Every structure is written in C-alpha cells, then in structure tokens.
Image (cartoon, rainbow, N blue to C red):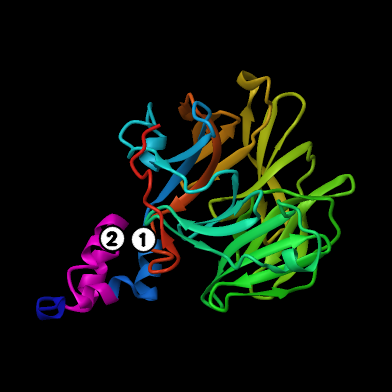
Amino acid sequence: MSYDDHMCEELVVEILSRLPTKSLLRFRSVSKSLYAVIGSPEFILLHTLRSPKKVMISHRCHKTAPAKYIYTLHSEAQMSSNNPYTGIPPAVRFPFTDYKIFGSCNGILCIHEYPKGDIHLWNPSIRRKVIIVHDHPLKLTFFYVARPVMLGFCFDPTIDDYKILMMHKPHAFVYTMKTHTWQAIASPPYYWFVSDSQCLLHGALHWLTKTDHYYNILTFHLSSEVFSTIELPEPSSITFQVTTIKGSLAAISSDPHAHSWIWVRNTAAASWSAAYKFDTNPFKETRMVLQIAPSEEFLCCRYFDEILVYKSETQSRVAELSDCSKMFDMNMCVESLGLLDMGTSWDQGSKENK
C-alpha cells in the first residue's frame, strides 16, 4: 500500500520537506513511492531551502598522532546561548586529513585534500562523498603544485548543476557535475594572490584578491563564466575576508589600532558603508577578524582559537566559544540530501567524541 491510498502527494511532500535528513533516510525504506519522492531532485532542492542554517566548526585535535579532524554543528539558538556546546550532537570525525574547505553550497562542502591534490564533494548530513575526476587539466597540462591558487564551488541554477572552478596562473577551468568534464575558460584579470575564502551572491562567486600593492574583490559570474573586479571600501587598512551580510556583499578589515570593521556594499549605488565596528583589544596578539560566518541574526567571528557571537542588530556579544582542541575552520551549512545515491558512504567514526 502506498501513501497515495491515504493522502495526496502534495501533503506528503509538505510534511517530509520539514523533517531532518536522518528521518528521511529511514523513510526511504518504507515504500517505493516514498523512495521515489525523497530521492527526486525537486524534493531535495525543496528540503534544502527549508532546512535551518547551522554553523559547522572544524576542530583539529593535537593529542592524537597523526592529528585528528572532527567537527561540531551548532544551530543559531545554540550559538547564542551561554554555552554553545551544550545540547549539540557528539563531534563527528572528518573523512579527510590535511584538507581545506573551499566552498559550501546547499549543504555540500568542496574539499581540497593535499598533498595528493584530490578534490572531493562531501555532505556531512548524510555522510556521503564524491571524488571529482582525479586527472583534472592542471595535472595534465603542466607542473601542478599540491595546492592550487584558487578553487570555487557553487550551484548554477541556469543549468541546474554544480560547478567547480579551478585556477592556477594563467589557466582556469570549470568542472560540471552532470557532464563530469573540465572545460578551459578565459583567465581572470592579473593578480598576485587570491584568498581561500569565498562567498556566493547574485549569481557570482567573490574572493579577496591582490594585484601588486592593491587589494580588490574578484568575481566569477556563474552563467556567463566571466571574471570581473570590484573595488574595496576606503579606507581599507588590511582586508581579510569577503562574505555576505543579509543579502549584501560585505568586506572585513582591520587597522593597526586594534579595530575591525565589516563594510557592506550597496549594489545599486556601488558604494560601501561601515555596518559593524568591533573593538578587538581583548585579542591584542591577533588584532584581526580572520573569518565570519553570517546568518540572519548572528555574526560568528573567529579570532584564531576563539569564536565570538554577536547579534546582528545590536552588535552586542551574546556568546563566546573556546575549546581545548584547535578550531580549524568555520562554515555556514544546512542539512540536505545532496549527493544522495552518489559517490560512497563514510560512516566510520560517526560517534566519536571530542
């Protein structure tokens, strides 16, 4: 007997799209009709859009040899509590070592693993990973260093597919998931340096880049696959990261006097304004904002091994995270079924505690 004998498909989809991935994976074994609905691309996209955002904090444990990487997931409510580590699931082990997360989209992380140079897509919600074609063009055409200058990862709605951008001066390539192929594209403007962190806004990827003595923002438009640049706000003392704040492009900078700013750009006017100012004097050794994971209500600011949580509206500090293990990275993510029935499953160490 299928669900069609009891209720309409629209109602079933409405209920299922609000459930956690763990429940949906179990329900796939109930009937063929549920299996088909939950595994459909339309349902996976709907479920992703309705899933609440979480902050993923990666930890590197130095008490083990070799070092072990684990991660914890925190809801917005947990991030704003006095003890953000209370009530969260046990830490989960990463299926990678010596890695860098280069992008997060629809609950899927793009991970570059070195020294092998492999690129993986990893969904921590369902613990599935997909390795991208190993012999990519940069390995075939010229001497390849273990860490490329830039990787980008995003979902292109115009073709309903994920893209991976890889660039090493003077070459640039785009990989599409459905075709499993790399295509050469026109290289971006001249640069010396491109940051690891990226953000996706209005159909374009954004990075902080340096040309000679100047910093600016490099953009890559998904549909046209064309690069362009955006000037940073002035004064721009030392800029560390670009991100998004409530649907707007933002840049994080700091000055020698231990102050940090988050600048927000008005796209229509092509102008910047200082939306947030932080006094980082308690962190005199760092004096900089290294990374920010934005949400609608909170800003999670990482200062090396410390993470401070501020309310977006009042800019008041509401929580502080610190841990005996080294905080390695921080990313916004959602629960999703992305990569379902693709790649391989990785369940080892799924209940390892910190």
Label 1, label 2: how far apart the Cα atoms are: 7 Å
Of 181 and 243, nearer the camera is 181
Task: Say if 79 sits above or below 333 in the image.
Answer: above
Q: Is residue 270 visible?
A: yes
CB contact under 8 Å: marks 1 and 2? yes
**Mark toward the start of the polypeptide (1 vs 2):** 2
In reply to whether residue 21 is colored magenta, the answer given is yes
Q: Which residue position is annotated with label 2?
A: 18
Where residue 22 appears, as percent x and y from the top left, is: 28, 55
Which element type, helix, strand or loop, lies under badge 1?
helix
- Residue drawn 75% across the image and 68% down it: 140
Magenta residues?
A: 8-36
Of the residues shown, which amino acid type is indicated by label 2? Arg
Q: Residues within 10 Å of mark 2 (few under 14, many from 20)?
A: some
Say which quadrant the N terminus sits in: bottom left
Task: Say if 104 sits above or below 82 in the image.
Answer: below
Say which quadrant the C terminus sits in: top left
Q: Residue furthest front?
A: 65
Where residue 185 appears, as percent x and y from the top left, is: 75, 73
- Residue drawn 68% across the image and 62% down it: 268
Q: Main secondary structure of the magenta part?
A: helix
Q: Which residue position is annotated with label 1?
A: 50
In the picture, residue 31 is in which quadrant?
A: bottom left
